[in-house]
Image: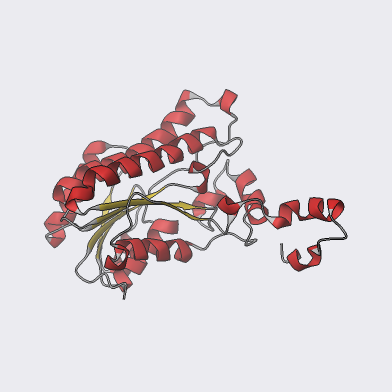
Amino acid sequence: MFSLEGKVAVVTGAASGLGKATALRFARAGARVVLADINDASEVAEEAGGIYVQTDVSREAQVKKLMERAVAEYGKLTTVVNNAGVAGAALSVDAITEEALDECIDVNLKGVLWGIKHAVPLMEDGGSIMNTSSYAGLFGTPTYGAYVISKAAIIGLTKTAALELAPRGIRVNCICPGTADTPMSYVEGAEIELKLSSMLQPLGRLAQPEEIAALYHFLASDESSFITGAAIPIDGGMSAGPSLGVIGPLYEKIFSEQLDISKFSNQ
């Protein structure tokens, strides 16, 4: 089950984090992998037995060449993971600058759009396109307005593409990770999110990249053949509601006689 034998996959943002974990997992499952990143991913490509194509996903022409290179190298294209992204600056809505908004839109949103646009003409019917959104695309996140805008738009784009490509059997889905233990979580400007995430995510920890890659693996496999147009949270339960690690003390104060908060001490 979940074999990717015979698949040819393009994974963007593959030099580190979720993209790296996904590319390596795809390779172990039997896929031929093309790794794309603006940063050097040649060592990861060697480990995956694939090829590295330096790509700035905000540039449409470069994404087009990336998809063409995959077909030229392996003869077909069945699978695309549009994962490359940036965290953006931590700014309140009234402080968002044009530069900060452009960065998130150009990389996070346009990178997905160009990936879909230029994969589809080359992709076999029955293929799978997967996009990285975020839990921040599902609901508001204070001080991350530019990032939220770009990630929410990915969800809308995913659903629209899924409808348009359904007649060809090409499935389009996106995942909405919570904060993961990746380099992007430690960049300047993401400190607030990093400090809060272990408390806000009900499972009480950051996601590991391999856990996110496992969901991409399933969506790339034929076993997920009836799933399309979905925005799937993988966020340690955060989209289900507030963590008891955060609101537990309030419950204890209000309902001290009815609720045993000690069971939530792992938070």
Q: Is 119 rendered above or below residue 18?
A: above
Work out whether residue 17 or residue 217 is closer to the camera in this orientation and state it: 217
Left or right side of 80 for 141: right
The image quarter containing residue 20 is bottom left
Nearer to the camera, 41 or 57: 57
The percent coordinates of residue 100 (x first, y second) are 48, 30
Q: Residue at x 33, y 69 (%)?
A: 47
Q: Quadrant of the C terminus?
A: bottom right
Can I make out residue 57 in this image? no
Colour basis: secondary structure
Q: Quadrant of the N terminus?
A: bottom left
Residue appearing at x 60%, y 35% in the figure: 143
Q: Position of residue 259 (x, y in %)?
A: 81, 61
- At which x and y percent is residue 15? 38, 56
Q: Residue at x 43, y 47 (%)?
A: 133
Q: Residue at x 37, y 61 (%)?
A: 216
Quarter of the view holding residue 156: top left
Left or right of 108: which side holds 90? right
Q: Could you say where residue 195 lies in the image, as x and y percent from the top left? A: 66, 50
Q: Residue furthest bottom?
A: 1
Q: Which of 209/127 is in front?
A: 127
Residue 4 in view, yes or no? yes
